[in-house]
Image: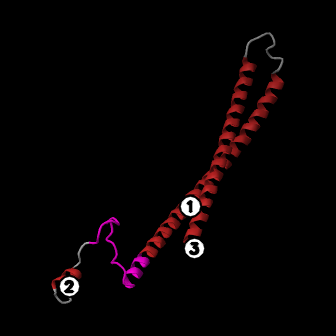
Amino acid sequence: MTDARTRHAALVRIRALQETKRKLEEWKLADFTRRARAVSDAEAQTIAALNADGPLKGLFVESGARRLESLARQRRSLEAATERQGEAMRVEARREKAACILEKEAARRVEEERRRQEDLAILEAFLAGGHPPIAPGASLGQAPGPSLLTDRSRRGGGTP
């Protein structure tokens, strides 16, 4: 395996790893968002319970207030974590994009190397006295088209 192919294979693995890392960061972000939404729902339920009219109204105001303070701390903590996680996800997305660009460049170099080797093989066959190279796009079953050199030599003409 050539250097370019080895590099390309390594970059394919790196890009796949970066994609997995980005997805993991997205999942973490979605989890923080879900948990923040659950805390907001719990706050709304606690407020609704404190505002409800009923025979026990006013008995649990202090415990309700402590619960609301606790939920507010959790929400602020989750919002900060969500912000940090969003930044971590963006960093991983940038890394994945960079790995993708490097992978495409490596693939281009592998293709360039393959074409160069193919061209060298055709040139070596031609210089070794083999058949002239097949025109691009011609199938292997087709004979190469007549060239100016072969037409003149058949007619008895000199060199061009």
Tell me the amino acid under the disc marked 3: Asp
Q: Is residue 139 above or below residue 119?
A: above
Residue pointed to by mark 1: 98
Q: Earlier in the sequence, mark 3 or mark 2?
A: 3
Circle 2 SS class: helix
Residue 13 in the image: x percent, y percent?
62, 60
Residue 77 in the image: x percent, y percent?
74, 42
Q: Report the span colored magenta.
A: 119-144
Q: Residue at x 23, y 83 (%)?
A: 149
Residue pointed to by mark 2: 153
Residue 87 visible in the snapshot: no
Left or right: where 54 falls relative to 106: right
Q: Residue at x 72, y 18 (%)?
A: 51
Residue pointed to by mark 3: 3
Residue 102 visible in the snapshot: yes
Q: CA distance from mark 1 to mark 3?
A: 20 Å
Circle 3 SS class: helix
Tell me the amino acid under the disc marked 1: Ala
Residue 78 in the image: x percent, y percent?
71, 41
Residue 85 in the image: x percent, y percent?
67, 48
Q: Earlier in the sequence, mark 1 or mark 3?
A: 3
Q: Report the front residue among 34 and 136.
A: 136
Q: Report the front residue among 46 and 106.
A: 106
Q: CA distance from mark 1 to mark 2?
A: 57 Å
Q: Residue at x 72, y 32 (%)?
A: 39
